[in-house]
Amino acid sequence: MANMRDRENRDVEIKKYLSAEERSEFLGEERSYGGFEPTGETISNYVLANSITTGQLANLLNDFLNLGGKGHREGLELGRYFQSAHRTLQQCFVGFLMGALMGLAEMDSKWTDARNEDSYAMLQKLKKLVDDGELAGSWRHI
């Protein structure tokens, strides 16, 4: 009995960090994705990661974020997944994210409007902290 309760508690903990699609898969529910039915074909994450370019990853993230207005909540989920990643990969992840943010901070202000003005302002503050050496770290060298 205790084993069943432990499994239920673990399942509740796992489910609170999953997206709707992942929860559906975890619970074994059938689901339609964007008008297309899943094929059941398995694609190796390693093969995909080894063959995707930075531009393709950017396009994939663009589509991911655009479908369903994803944002902060999904970012928290992603960070929580990386809590159990290898420590070197956690460092690489932070370097990757900081690089992405610094790249976005280089955006010309003419591309700013009410939809992204808060993000732009935050990125400019973050860029200033980095440029002034107040936010330093080895993430820059990864």
Image: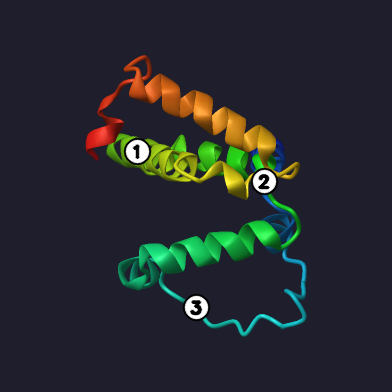
| First reached walking from the N terminus: tag 3 or tag 1 | 3
Quadrant of residue 38 within the rendered picture = bottom right
Q: For the residue labelled by badge 3, is the local secondary structure a helix, a strand or a loop?
A: loop
Identify the disc placed on residue 42.
3
- Say what amino acid the circle numbered 2 marks: Gly
- Say what amino acid the circle numbered 1 marks: Gly
Please name the residue that numbered disc 2 is placed on: 71
Q: CA distance from mark 2 to mark 3?
A: 27 Å
Report the residue that reaches farthest toward the front.
Answer: 110
Instruction: Tell me if mark 1 has few (under 14), some (14-19) or many (20+) residues whose alpha carbon lies within 10 angstroms of its own.
Output: some
Mark 2, mark 3: which one is toward the viewer?
2
Q: For the residue labelled by badge 1, is the local secondary structure a helix, a strand or a loop?
A: helix
Please name the residue that numbered disc 1 is placed on: 95
Q: Tell me where residue 37 appears, x and y as whole percent.
A: 71, 83
Specify whether 99 is left or right of 2. left
Q: Out of 129 and 88, give the one closest to the viewer.
A: 129
| First reached walking from the N terminus: tag 2 or tag 3 | 3
- Say what amino acid the circle numbered 3 marks: Thr
Specify whether 58 is left or right of 92. right
Report the residue that reaches farthest toward the top.
Answer: 134
Instruction: Tell me if mark 3 has few (under 14), some (14-19) or many (20+) residues whose alpha carbon lies within 10 angstroms of its own.
Output: few
Image quarter of the C terminus:
top left
Q: Out of 19 and 7, give the one closest to the viewer.
A: 19
Q: Are marks 2 and 1 in contact (CB under 8 Å)?
A: no
Q: CA distance from mark 3 to mark 1?
A: 30 Å
In the image, residue 118 above or below residue 114: above
